[in-house]
């Protein structure tokens, strides 16, 4: 999250600099700045959602792997028990 925070800070700093140095008239500059700020905020939100999605996916993947490992171990134990009973 630190990277995205730095990105957001840099983007806002850039937008502010652009607003101060823009050749546009006041109203047009404010509209352009507002549009840029909304875009940066939207990009940050999307980035956060992607990060959250990756975390959820990793957790689900680990749970599935754990369940598979337990099922595999249980089936091996049952096979061994069957082999022992046949002797």
Image (tube, rainbow, N blue to C red):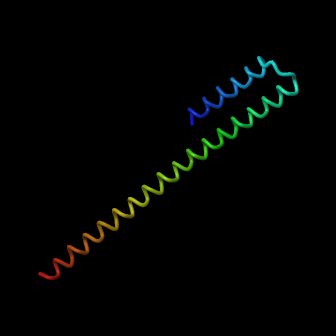
Q: Is residue 79 above or below residue 38?
A: below
- Left or right of 84 in this view: 6: right
Q: Is residue 5 above or below residue 71?
A: above
Q: Is residue 6 above or below residue 49?
A: above
> Quadrant of residue 48 in the image?
top right
Q: Relative to the observer, which residue lies in front, 16 or 25?
A: 25
Quadrant where the image shows the N terminus: top right
Q: Residue at x 56, y 32 (%)?
A: 3
Residue found at the far bottom of this picture: 86
Q: Relative to the observer, which residue lies in front, 50 or 18?
A: 18
Q: Position of residue 66 (x, y in %)?
A: 38, 60
Q: Position of residue 67 (x, y in %)?
A: 39, 64
Q: Residue at x 61, y 47 (%)?
A: 49
What is the count of numbered marks?
Answer: 0
Q: Residue at x 17, y 77 (%)?
A: 83
- Left or right of 64 in this view: 15: right
Quadrant where the image shows the C terminus: bottom left
Q: Position of residue 34 (x, y in %)?
A: 79, 32
- Left or right of 31 in this view: 53: left
Q: Residue at x 64, y 26 (%)?
A: 10
> Quadrant of residue 37 in the image?
top right
């Amino acid at each position: 999250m630190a990277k995205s925070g730095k990105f957001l800070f840099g983007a806002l700093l850039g937008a502010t600099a652009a607003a101060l140095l823009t050749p546009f008239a006041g109203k047009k500059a404010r509209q352009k700045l507002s549009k840029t700020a909304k875009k940066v905020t939207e990009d940050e939100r999307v980035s956060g959602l992607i990060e959250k999605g990756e975390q959820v996916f990793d957790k689900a993947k680990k749970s599935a792997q754990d369940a598979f490992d337990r099922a595999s171990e249980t089936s091996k134990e049952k096979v061994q028990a069957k082999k022992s009973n046949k002797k």
